Amino acid sequence: MKTTTATHSSAATEPGSGNAPAGAAVVSFRDVTKNYGPVRAVDGLTLDLHPGETVALLGPNGAGKSSTLDLMLGLRPADSGSVQLFGTTPREAIAAGRVGVMLQTGGLMEDVTVRELVTLTCALHPRPYPVDQVLGLAGVSDIAGRMVNKLSGGQEQRVRFALATAGHNDLIVLDEPTTGMDVTARQAFWATMREQAAQGRTVLFATHYLEEADAIADRVLVLSKGRLLADGTAAEIKARAGARRIAFDLTEGAVDEQALRELPHLTGFERHGETVRLQSSDADATVHAVYALGAYPRNLEVAGLGLEQAFIALTEAEEA
């Protein structure tokens, strides 16, 4: 998703002030739809985001994540319904300096140094932070003198993060923010995001790294075909998938594989040598049936689905 950098000089708006009453939703979608020809990218979306939340936006390719972010940021108009940020329009909220945005691509000038670009962004922000503070928080102080067009992919992402946090924003929107970052940079990035949320800011991020969503987000939104398929904590999303993982070892040939595949309540089956991995909507009944086959599983483990497995189960069910 690409966008250009806009500049604004509106008066500062302190958190909780402006047109939105205290305690109001930071982001509010009401029955929002967006079509691209015959394709409905966003389909009747209704949701609210609140101060201090860290929210992961998940969905398979084509689920409507980028379109939802475009609508939220005022980059495209909705065909129907309403989108509000802090009780006003997205463009008004952005002009007031209340929204910081980090997109996957675009927004970086070339033929300037990192410091020059961050300095310009801070100068244009209604409520800027000191340049050195922004460089330090984004982890780019050591490359401040480097030309932007000489950066690696991970370094570009950290510079985009610096631009998104150049001033006091009440909402930070991140689209695949850690793409290209190494493990250390990713950990430092999320530590900074936790600090932002702890200060009362709302952080919304779209990601394909489901382990990040599981570890970082206190709320997960799952989109499918433009609709809100699930909304809750990572634990609630996992529980909603309604399946558990079962793993054990069997001596090869001890039980016919077809008999294992026909165990009750299976939603997934894998076997690699002696190791059998199952997914079941009723783990107790499935394990009982394993013993009823006369099998004696070793190293038996039963656990809930991880967020990735739950996400796959929910979206596959929706497709079906």
Image (tube, rainbow, N blue to C red):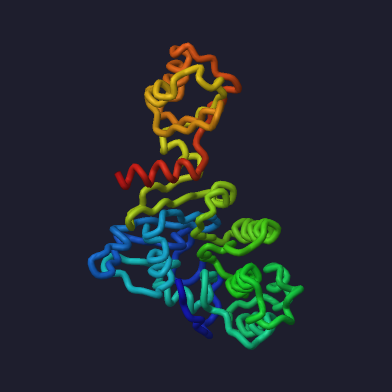
In the image, taking residue 122 as reference, residue 220 lies left or right, namely left
Which image quarter: residue 76? bottom left
In the image as oriented, which residue stretches furthest toward the right?
Answer: 142
Q: How many marks?
A: 0
User: Farthest residue toward the left?
Assistant: 38
- The quadrant of the picture occupied by the C terminus is top left
Residue at image x 50%, y 56%?
A: 208
Residue 258 position, x and y percent, is: 40, 24
Residue 31, compared with residue 137, is above or below; it is above
Between 275 and 124, the one nearer to me in the picture: 275
Q: Is residue 246 above or below residue 296?
A: below
The residue lying at 50 percent from left, 54 percent from top is 56
Question: Which residue is found at the position 59% from the left and 48% from the top?
Answer: 215
Quarter occupied by residue 86: bottom left
Residue 167 in view of the camera: no
Coordinates of residue 67 in the picture (x, y in percent): 38, 66
In which quadrant of the rendered image does the N terminus lie? bottom left
Q: Residue furthest bottom?
A: 111
Which residue is rendered at x = 54% and y = 55% of the image?
Answer: 54
Judge by depth and name the residue closer to the eye, 131 or 281.
Answer: 281
The image shows residue 232 at horizontal and vertical percentages of 45, 45
The one of 28 and 188 positioned closer to us in this rendering: 188
Q: Is residue 154 visible?
A: yes
Q: Nearer the viewer, residue 122 or 115?
A: 115
Q: Is residue 173 above or below residue 246?
A: below
Q: Position of residue 272 (x, y in %)?
A: 53, 32
